[in-house]
């Protein structure tokens, strides 16, 4: 079961956060409310009446909108075309693009977004694409907006802007349901927090009455069965309850509640938890494994994305790449892993020229890669977990024996990795798409680190992971560094960059605007450089 006796009440005009470990059932519950999943049991009420959505179309018609962690946009269409898709204004039987742009611009302005309606979606940053998704839901009349990990791809500044937008929606009487692993962020914006664990709702607290550590303990179940762990009573949400205990108000749509919902999955038994290990002893900084000078490359839109980037990485160090999303970080990672061609500059990677690099060559040289978009670049979601674990090494032991697939060896190694990384459910035969986004990310990280790379390029390595999984991944990156690997870490999470990096390069508009050794790392100065400012010290 991915949901088992899950209950949720939503009050009008509130910002409700739903938290829990990866695989706890948060997204599954939201997908039930949005009509994507159909519950096997339980009740779901609006306006005091039982409802059952056959599809998201029904949910949208009742004023429920959802922005998924992985966006559902058509990249080759414009912002306006995506927003009005399915509800296009027409003129003489054709799309009235001018009217569509006017409508979308008005919606964006009303809710405080700045977007060009005629811009193609594939030219936008990830953060801007998320804004398109939110505007699309609001344009369709959403009174209840479900946001699944909305800040996973945003900079701190963009996250602050989104927080203001969410509070503004609540002030207008709308309801926002926020799914997030960032507990500090949750407590800063939410009115109320619901905690889920293994398919059940296990606690409900007022955000003002709890702490990050208390929520974390509730999420993992350390000595807690209820909100009593926080030292405060659970909030009783004002609602007109029916006999089943369900039914709270949804802003603008009447009352809604979901009680004892159940949805199918293969299993929710947890994998073996990763045992706490002592901090790895560094092998020390070694020889240069990556050295590039005046690197130049074009973006997907044909415009310059990297404009003279120079950097070095040595064995046994983690080099952080910081910057506002869309300033060349993704393109840099793709050049270093053979996914994007060089347009100029020179460099060596593990002793060989960078020019002419392909993904196969990079893998053969010992380069590991955790890309930003795992679904597009790292996995085949219809294949099983064990087949995805073997990708790239399917002709090598323990995944192969001579020219033949070693099914037993593959199964045993996959089982070991699922246990070590606490992937849930720990079933190697499941299609990868049956796992939550966070557990899919664990599989990718486990596979790449298991290959013992000499150079590891990771982009947003902890995007969508819960606090326990973040700690695991950070520990594994430190272990790779201690074994002598060079690690290039691209992250929009400034706290992550500061916590892990031995040195940090800052990218702005495809150029390096700052280079800081660990002892000189300063969050304010990094932030200034990320926005293109010159040094404040000279």
Image: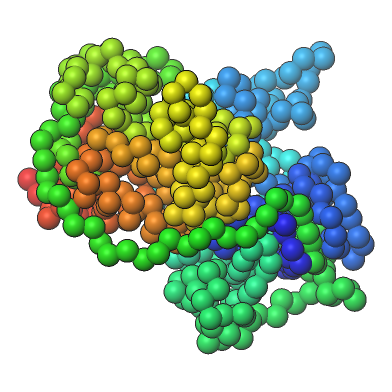
Q: In this view, does 197 lie to the left or right of 420?
A: right
Residue found 18% across the figure and 57% down from its top? 281
**Quadrant position of residue 358:** top left
Residue found 34% across the figure and 26% down from its top? 363
Task: Estimate the x, y position of residue 103 in percent, counting from the top left.
Answer: 67, 33
**Closer to us: 256 or 168:** 256
Residue found 26% across the figure and 35% down from its top? 455
Q: Is residue 523 above or below residue 210?
A: above
Q: In this view, does 221 lie above or below 199?
A: below
Task: Estimate the x, y position of residue 86 in percent, counting from the top left.
Answer: 76, 28
Q: Is residue 507 above or below residue 187?
A: above
On the rendered image, what quadrant is the N terminus found in?
bottom right
Q: Is residue 428 visible?
A: yes
**Quadrant position of residue 258:** bottom right
**Closer to us: 180 or 307:** 180
Task: Estimate the x, y position of residue 342 in percent, counting from the top left.
Answer: 28, 15
Residue found 61% across the figure and 80% down from its top? 225
């Amino acid at each position: 079961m991915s949901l088992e006796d899950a209950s949720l009440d939503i009050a009008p005009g509130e910002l409700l956060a739903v938290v829990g470990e990866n695989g706890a059932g948060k997204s599954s519950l939201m997908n039930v409310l949005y009509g994507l999943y159909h519950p096997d049991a339980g009740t779901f009420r609006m306006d005091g009446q039982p409802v059952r959505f056959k599809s998201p179309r029904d949910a949208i018609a009742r004023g429920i909108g959802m922005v998924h962690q992985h966006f559902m946009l058509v990249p080759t269409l414009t912002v306006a075309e995506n927003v009005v898709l399915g509800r296009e204004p027409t003129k003489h039987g054709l799309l009235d693009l001018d009217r569509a742009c006017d409508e979308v611009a008005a919606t964006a302005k009303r809710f405080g977004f700045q977007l060009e309606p005629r811009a193609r979606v594939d030219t936008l940053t990830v953060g801007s694409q998320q804004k398109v998704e939110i505007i699309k839901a609001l344009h369709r009349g959403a009174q209840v907006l479900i946001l699944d990990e909305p800040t996973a791809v945003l900079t701190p500044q963009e996250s602050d802007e989104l927080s203001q937008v969410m509070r503004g929606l609540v002030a207008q009487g709308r309801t926002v349901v926020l799914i997030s692993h960032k507990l500090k962020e949750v407590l800063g914006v939410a009115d109320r927090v619901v905690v889920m664990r293994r398919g059940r709702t296990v606690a409900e607290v007022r955000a003002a009455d709890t702490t990050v550590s208390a929520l974390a303990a509730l999420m993992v179940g350390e000595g807690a069965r209820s909100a009593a762990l926080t030292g405060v009573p659970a909030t009783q949400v004002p609602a007109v309850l029916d006999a089943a205990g369900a039914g709270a108000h949804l802003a603008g749509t009447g009352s809604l509640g979901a009680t004892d919902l159940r949805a199918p999955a293969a299993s929710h038994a947890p994998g073996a938890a990763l045992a706490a290990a002592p901090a790895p002893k560094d092998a020390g900084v070694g020889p240069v494994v990556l050295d590039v000078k005046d690197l130049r490359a074009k973006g997907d839109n044909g415009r310059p994305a990297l404009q003279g980037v120079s950097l070095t990485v040595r064995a046994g160090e983690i080099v952080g790449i910081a910057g506002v999303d869309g300033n060349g970080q993704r393109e840099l990672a793709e050049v270093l892993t053979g996914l994007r061609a060089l347009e100029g500059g020179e460099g060596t990677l593990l002793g060989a020229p960078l020019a002419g690099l392909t993904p196969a060559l990079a893998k053969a040289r010992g380069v590991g890669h955790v890309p930003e978009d795992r679904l597009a670049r790292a996995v085949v979601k219809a294949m099983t977990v064990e087949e995805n674990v073997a990708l790239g090494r399917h002709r090598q032991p323990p995944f192969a024996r001579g020219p033949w697939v070693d099914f037993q060896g593959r199964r045993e190694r996959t089982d070991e990795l699922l246990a070590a990384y606490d992937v849930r459910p720990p079933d190697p035969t499941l299609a990868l798409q049956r796992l939550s986004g966070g557990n899919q990310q664990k599989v990718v990280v486990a596979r790449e680190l298991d290959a013992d790379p000499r150079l590891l390029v990771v982009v947003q390595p902890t995007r969508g992971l819960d606090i326990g999984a973040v700690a695991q991944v950070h520990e594994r990156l430190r272990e790779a560094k201690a074994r002598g690997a060079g690690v290039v870490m691209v992250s929009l999470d400034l706290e992550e960059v500061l916590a892990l990096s031995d040195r940090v390069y800052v990218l702005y508009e495809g150029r390096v605007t700052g280079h800081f050794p660990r002892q000189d790392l300063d969050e304010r100065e990094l932030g200034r450089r990320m926005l293109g400012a010159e040094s404040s010290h000279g």
